[in-house]
Amino acid sequence: MTILVDTSVWVDFFRGNSTAPVIRLKALVGREEILLGDLILAELLQGVKDDQDLKRVNASFSAYRVVPLVGEAMARQSALYYRQLRERGITIRKTIDCLIATWCIRNHVPLLHNDRDFHSFVSLGLKEVLEFKALSEN
């Protein structure tokens, strides 16, 4: 199985927090293909405070394939999902989260996360999104 891991999980991982998604991530390392999205990488590198941490983060991610998460088709589909959720009274807080969810849905790749906004995509009735919750809660 291939899995995309969200920024919310990586932040907890690097802080040493033992959340359920971090425990799940540790169990998946070496057993499953873990992907790193380019937007997720950008978010993580923006939060790095010094050169020592930058080296540690870069070394940790050298084992993972970085995939591009956005392009015109993804941007258009993401906007459609955002509008569909907004019509139901749900507002996704970050554009990047909507893009990440859209990429996962379109590519049938589950997302390991620790962010409540991703649960909103289940209400769209899309089968692929159901895996978000399952991976986060196991």
Image (cartoon, rainbow, N blue to C red):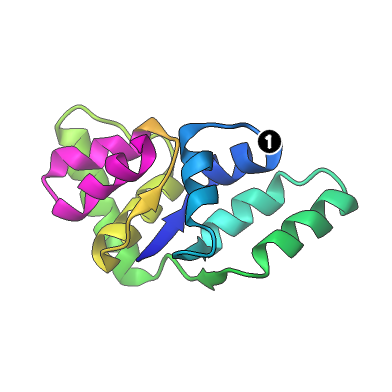
Q: Quadrant of the C terminus?
A: top left
Q: Is residue 111 magenta?
A: no
How many numbered circles does the render carry? 1
Please tell me which residue is depicted at 70% across the width and 60% down the height of the picture: 60
On the picture, is 40 further left or further right than 79? right
Secondary structure beneath label 1? loop
Extreme residue toward the top, this view? 89
Location of residue 7 with respect to 75 vertically, above or below: above
**Residue type, mark 1 in image:** Gly
Which residue does the image show at 40% across and 60% down from the upper left? 3
Few, some or many residues within 10 Å of mark 1 (<14, 14–19, 20+): few
**Residue 8 picture location, percent across and down:** 52, 40
- Principal SS element in the magenta part? helix
Percent x, y of residue 28: 47, 55
The residue indicated by pointer 1 is: 16
The answer to whether 110 is drawn above or below residue 22 in the figure is below
Name the residue nearer the viewer: 12 or 105. Answer: 12
x%, y% of residue 82? 26, 44
**If the image is split into quadrants, where does the N terminus sit?**
bottom left
Which residue is rendered at x = 26% and y = 64% of the image? Answer: 108
Q: Is residue 9 above or below residue 110?
A: above
Magenta range is 117-138
Quarter of the image for residue 59 reads bottom right
* Quadrant position of residue 89: top left
